[in-house]
Amino acid sequence: MAHRYIRTVLSVVALTLAAPRVSWACPVCFGDPNSPMALGASWGILLLLGITAGVLSAFAGFFLYLMKRSRMALDGERIGLSRSPQAR
């Protein structure tokens, strides 16, 4: 099993060294940083980061909302218990 893994890794390394142009970065990353394609890729990355931050913020806000509602419910129970006849 280990021989097969080593042979696969060595094959990939040999192919990468035999054809280095194929293993280079894409023209967007490797070329002109001011080209329209590179700027579009940068804006796409920023958009995806913004969406991710928005979803995570909404998720955190939902849990903060649940904590607030839980505290309100517990305070209501304490007030209700102190006024009940069994608490006296």
Image: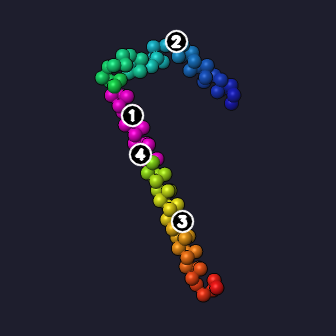
- Ranked by sequence position, the earlier of labels 3 and 4 is 4
The residue where tag 2 is placed is 18
How far is disc 4 from disc 1 in space, using C-alphas?
Answer: 12 Å
The residue where tag 4 is placed is 54
Which quadrant, please, contains the C terminus? bottom right
At a point 49% along the width and 13% down the height, the residue shown is: 20
Which of the 4 image quadrants contains residue 77? bottom right
Residue 38 horizontal/vertical position (percent): 35, 23
How far is disc 3 from disc 4 in space, using C-alphas?
Answer: 26 Å
Give the overall secondary structure of the magenta segment. helix
The residue where tag 3 is placed is 71
Q: Amino acid at mark 1?
A: Leu
How far is disc 3 from disc 1 in space, using C-alphas?
Answer: 37 Å
Q: Helix, strand or loop at disc 2?
A: helix
Whether residues under marks 2 and 1 lie with C-beta atoms below 8 angstroms apart, the answer is no
Q: Amino acid at mark 4?
A: Gly
Most foreground residue, 5 or 80: 80
Q: Give the number of the mark in front: 2 or 3.
A: 3
Q: Give the number of the mark in front: 4 or 2.
A: 4
Residue extending furthest toward the left: 36
Whether residues under marks 3 and 4 lie with C-beta atoms below 8 angstroms apart, the answer is no
